[in-house]
Image (cartoon, helix red, strand yellow):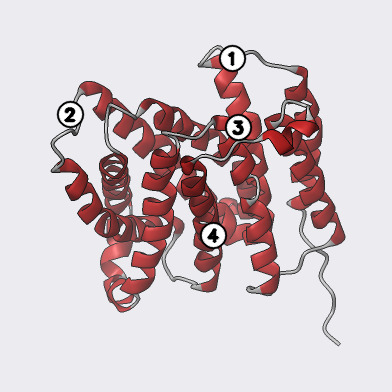
């Protein structure tokens, strides 16, 4: 068997990929901020996941053909996963980004790994060591330090707007999406499974996108809309979701959830490098907490021998 197929090499690869998925997801923040007035939320999400699903289906076509009975037999699972991961965590994020701030989005999404970790312990029976718990606490402190720019008293001044409710729903849906993938084991590999989930998401999105498309005030399709679809479909779509799904299958839901703490850190760097926003000392302070926290939280819990 090739070395790359060994459990040790798969775990090393998964640990490296933990750092990549949040970086790819930051592209979706840029898409969400650019989309209003260019393309409607459900139309964008449908086009994004149609593109991503088609690419994944081509790559995994032989496996999908061989497992079609399984896919049809548990098709309701793929509809639920697609509704959570592609509709709620796709279109609803685009809707929320129309009225809420990047600071609020980062603050709300910071709770997602906590929900995943707690759900993995309480619902999936995964073990959570004191080192992992400490890592979660340290990383969360770093996230808050970044999103409040080092001014902790600003937490009480956060203004909630309608968009925040969409982001809260997306945050809860993402936790459910991650946990259900572990709750419902699949014989499919990471690529084929994500292709099947994309198909479920496209089915769930289609009626809402059709309704948006028939509205009289919809924006005309443009090259800018095409660019947003390509960016969202290829980078945070195929890239980030496949990476996250592979890492979760190898490492477990609670360990992989900690990688989401990198989101605000990467988001701040993207805002500085792409949007020209200033990089402050609070980013450095947050990094000094987030990075060690992820290292601790992603460590394997020690195994206890059977009595």
Residues at marks 3 and 4, CA–CA distance in whole angstroms: 24 Å
- Between discs 2 and 1, the one toward the N terminus: 2
Q: Nearer the viewer, residue 6 or 159?
A: 159
- The answer, for residue 19, to whether it is visible in the render is no
Density class for disc 1 (Cα within 10 Å; few <14, some 14-19, many ≥20) is few
Circle 4 residue:
178
Q: Position of residue 110 (x, y in %)?
A: 65, 45
Which residue position holds label 2? 221
Residue 128 in picture, x, y percent from top left: 77, 64
Whole-percent x, y for residue 232 in the image: 37, 35
Residue 228, visible in the rendered structure: yes
**Quarter occupied by residue 39:** top left
- Asked whether the beta carbons under mark 2 and mark 4 sit within 8 Å of each other, the answer is no
Q: Which residue is mark 1?
A: 277
Q: Nearer the viewer, mark 3 or mark 4?
A: 3
Q: Secondary structure at mark 4?
A: helix
Q: Which of marks 1 and 4 precedes in the sequence?
A: 4
Which quarter of the rendered picture does the C terminus lie within? Answer: bottom right
The residue indicated by pointer 3 is 103
For marks 2 and 4 on the same chain, the one whose residue lies earlier in the sequence: 4
Residues at marks 2 and 4, CA–CA distance in whole angstroms? 33 Å
Q: Secondary structure at mark 3?
A: helix
Left or right side of 29 for 255: right
Quick one: SS at disc 1? Answer: loop
Residues at circles 3 and 4 in contact by the CB criterion of under 8 Å: no
> How many neighbours does mark 2 have within 10 angstroms: few (below 14), some (14-19), or many (20 or more)?
few
As measured in the structure, the alpha-carbon distance from the residue carrying label 2 to the one carrying label 1 is 30 Å
């Amino acid at each position: 068997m090739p070395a790359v197929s060994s459990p040790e090499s798969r775990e090393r690869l998964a640990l490296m990929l933990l750092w990549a998925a949040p970086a790819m997801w930051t592209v979706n923040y840029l898409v969400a901020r650019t989309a209003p007035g260019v393309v409607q939320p459900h139309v964008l999400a449908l086009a994004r996941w149609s593109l991503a699903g088609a690419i994944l289906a081509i790559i995994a076509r032989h496996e999908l053909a061989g497992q079609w009975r399984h896919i049809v037999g548990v098709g309701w699972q793929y509809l639920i996963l697609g509704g959570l991961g592609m509709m709620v965590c796709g279109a609803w994020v685009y809707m929320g980004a129309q009225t809420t701030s990047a600071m609020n989005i980062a603050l709300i999404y910071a709770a997602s790994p906590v929900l995943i970790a707690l759900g993995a312990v309480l619902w999936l029976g995964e073990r959570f060591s004191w080192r992992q718990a400490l890592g979660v606490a340290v990383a969360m402190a770093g996230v808050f330090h970044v999103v409040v720019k080092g001014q902790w008293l600003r937490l009480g001044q956060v203004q909630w707007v309608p968009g925040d409710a969409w982001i809260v729903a997306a945050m809860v849906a993402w936790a459910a999406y991650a946990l259900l993938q572990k709750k419902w084991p699949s014989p499919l590999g990471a690529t084929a499974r994500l292709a099947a989930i994309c198909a479920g998401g496209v089915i769930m999105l289609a009626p809402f996108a059709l309704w948006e498309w028939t509205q009289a005030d919809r924006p005309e399709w443009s090259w800018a809309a095409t660019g947003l679809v390509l960016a969202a479909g290829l980078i945070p779509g195929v890239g980030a979701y496949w990476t996250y799904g592979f890492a979760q299958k190898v490492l477990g839901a609670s360990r992989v959830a900690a990688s989401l703490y990198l989101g605000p850190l990467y988001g701040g760097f993207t805002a500085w490098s792409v949007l020209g926003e200033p990089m402050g000392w609070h980013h450095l302070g947050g990094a000094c907490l987030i990075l060690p926290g992820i290292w601790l939280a992603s460590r394997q819990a020690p195994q206890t021998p059977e009595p």
